[in-house]
Amino acid sequence: MDEDLTQHDVPREAAFFDLDKTIIATSSATAFSRPFLAEGLLTRRSVLRTAYAQLLYLVGGADEDQTERLRAQLSRMVAGWDVSLVSSIVAETLHESIDPTVYAEAVALIEAHHAAGRDVVVVSASGAEVVEPIAAILGADRVIATRMNVVDGRYTGEIDFYAYGENKASAIRDLAAVEGYDLEASYAYSDSITDAPMLGTVGHAFAVNPDRALRRLAVERGWGTLSFVRPVPLFPRRARIATAGVVTVVVVAVAVVWVAVRRRRRSR
């Protein structure tokens, strides 16, 4: 091989993680409802609406049309919000809003992929102002998230990029082209059938706590299926990253993925 080749000339691998119900056991878009209400960004009526939408999401009852209505509702709701205020609220309340909902199994997989030399990319339909701080705490290398239009420091209510459905897959392919990722050798994880395009971009796809439609598709396409069941506080866990308990979880997570891949190969 030519010694003058740059790092991006050598194929690299990545692991792409959906956020809601894959890394965390809730909806990141609505997890900050309480602090937003306290700061006057939300009304009690809008909180009830988002709580109902979150309930539909958590029980798997939100189809693509309902998800699109939620997107439109959230867009209208944030119009006029001060971006710096939103960012400060997220930073100050990240612990109480997100911390108790992080899946231990997801954290273990992220650590295992990093140990294997892969970049970790969080891919979420939630806004970048919410996703990026969560991804930073998780130690992710890149973020693909929805980006709202901003004028004079405030959201206009318009969306510049909606990280949803096929848009996620397109963004992954674009990022792979820039970073030199070998997508056939890369991994992806999600819970929802709406992320089928994202899962289909990589060679190693896994359905995590999948909805019914995704479970069927995973069987049809030979994708692995994983069950995440243990939400834990993230901040103390990050401080204890070198403890034996975390190492054990990492080993178990790697074993689960290895078994799933082996079964997939045997079924071909």
Image (cartoon, rainbow, N blue to C red):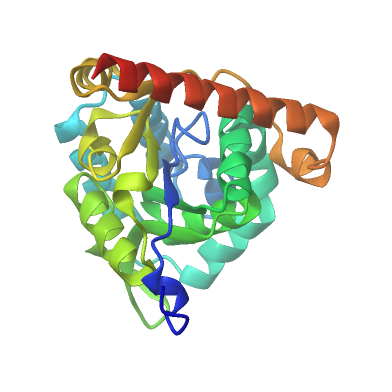
Q: Quadrant of the N terminus?
A: bottom left
Which residue is drawn at the image coordinates 38% and 61% (left, top)?
11
Instruction: Note whether residue 124 is visible.
Output: yes
Q: Is residue 157 visible?
A: no
- Residue for point 34% across, 55% down: 182
**Is residue 85 toward the left or the right of residue 164 in the image?**
right
Q: Quadrant of residue 156?
A: bottom left
In the rendering, at what x and y percent does residue 238 appear? Answer: 75, 45
Residue 181 placement (x, y as % from top left) = 37, 59
Q: Nearer the viewer, residue 159 or 137?
A: 137
Q: In the image, is 240 to the left or to the right of 155?
A: right
Question: Looking at the image, which is closer to me, 21 or 27?
Answer: 21
Tell me the quarter of the picture where residue 111 sits: top right
| Residue at the image position 53 percent from the left and 60 percent from the top | 141
Tell me residue 89's x, y (percent): 60, 58
Residue 96: give x, y in percent of width and height.
68, 41
Q: Is residue 199 left or right of residue 103?
A: left
